[in-house]
Image (cartoon, coloured by chain):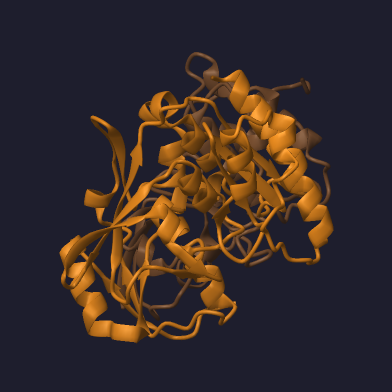
Chain colours: A orange, B brown
Amino acid sequence: MIPAPFTYQRARTAEEAVDLAAEAGDDGKFLAGGHSLLPLMKLRFAVPEVLIDIGRLTELSYIRDEDGHIAIGALTRHHDLEHSGLLAAELPLLARAAGAVGDPQVRHRGTIGGSLVHGDAASDLPAVGLALDATLVVRGPSGSREIAMTDFFLGLFETALEPGELLTEIRVPKPGERGWSFQKFTKRAIDWAIVGVAVQGGRVALVNMGPVPARAGGVERALAAGAGPAEAAARAAEGTSPASDINASAAYREHLARVLTARALAEAASRN
Amino acid sequence: MKVAISVNGTQVEAEVEDRLLLAHFVREVAGLTATNIGCDTTSCGACTVLLDGESVKSCTVLAAQADGREVTTCEGLAGSDGQWHAVQRAFRAEHGLQCGFCTPGMVMAAVSLLAENPDPTEAQVRTGLEGNLCRCTGYHNIVRSVLAAARDLQQPGGRAPAGAAEPAGEPA
């Protein structure tokens, strides 16, 4: 399968990338690692006329300790997150989840920024970003702005990014509550999660339990009210709207959400 | 667009369509057909090559993204004297293949895995090859091959490919 024709442009700086995107308008798309976008283009689900390759912007590939938070460049690859000593110490949830994305070849190419802006509720890192209460720094023609992770996902593959805006950095506050867990249920290692759960302290987010990546509000409220892990996990499917598809029925996904959340809360408690 | 990609140490320059995939560049422009295209959906790993030394699925990389970079295919593993790479020798000695379709990708994934983790456990080999599907072997001999190659590469002077030892005799 070969993508429909497009014009390839390569940005040398983040500034140039934003300029090229402004020129391309609605016909343009940023290309990072390409492991969400290129498969969609081969299937003709995405047909951009201009691809702006930002994959060589090494200025956007970093993991830094900045006092109260960890700053992660949007083009940092899953492989680099997985093997980061800084993340292992400060954000082990992110290092662990990044190491569970796809397979080694995918992790050599895919980036955290690409995964987040793709906005797929079946991807792992959106839920992890929600559980970590991250903030996204984006750059557009009129300057930079910050978007809270909780305000970022708006609908099916729809985010708060304005046309032409480039995600540049993910800022993650150092967790106050250290307990964490990442649970992912798949048929084969390389598949998307049928259901997944990310836990950091009292924040719980679900993978693939609806069209939009979301926190598990019922579980979080129960935990805040003093419920134990089992009691809180029983509410994992509240407010979700999982799909029925070739891999699982909605009812099975709801069951999995409760089971995986119970396991995740127990594991997180053991790490406090 | 014009791309210049080092393929197995040889500079390959060509005017290509912007949408050309690296897998097609390697097979049709560079003329190296060890790299197979299986699923064409980033799943099976048959098209795995090394890009700047790291395994990637070449069906999901544009040739334009590899412009100016180094690509290694299975044809590029042997030494200049024709001596096979330790991973290639191990796949033969340990019967790490049956039909052979997945093998070039499997070998390249294994080379990348051993570059990152020279002394993997069996479990680490299995997770390290998660991106490559084999429908014949049931994976057991593939895992055995990679472990044998790791042992071979760790021997003094056993760095592949030049001057490496003869294929290991008995399966582990």
Residue A31 x %, y %: 38, 67
Residue furthest to the front in view is A225
Looking at the figure, which quarter contains the N terminus of chain B?
A: bottom left
> Residue at (54%, 78%) from the top-left corner?
A2
- Would you say A132 lies left or right of B75 here? left
Quarter of the image for residue B54 reads top left
Residue A33 visible in this rendered orientation of the protein: no
Q: Is residue B57 above or below residue B80?
A: below
- Would you say A232 lies left or right of A77 here? right
Q: Is residue B40 above or below residue B108?
A: below
Looking at the figure, which quarter contains the C terminus of chain B?
A: top right
Residue A271 x %, y %: 56, 20
Q: In the depicted view, which residue is nearer to us: B26 or A97?
A: A97
> Residue at (55%, 65%) from the top-left corner?
B59
Q: In the depicted view, which residue is nearer to us: A143 or A86?
A: A143
Residue A44 x %, y %: 56, 82
> Residue at (71%, 39%) from the top-left corner?
A233
Q: In the depicted view, which residue is nearer to us: A50 or A154?
A: A154
- Would you say B137 lies left or right of B117 here? right
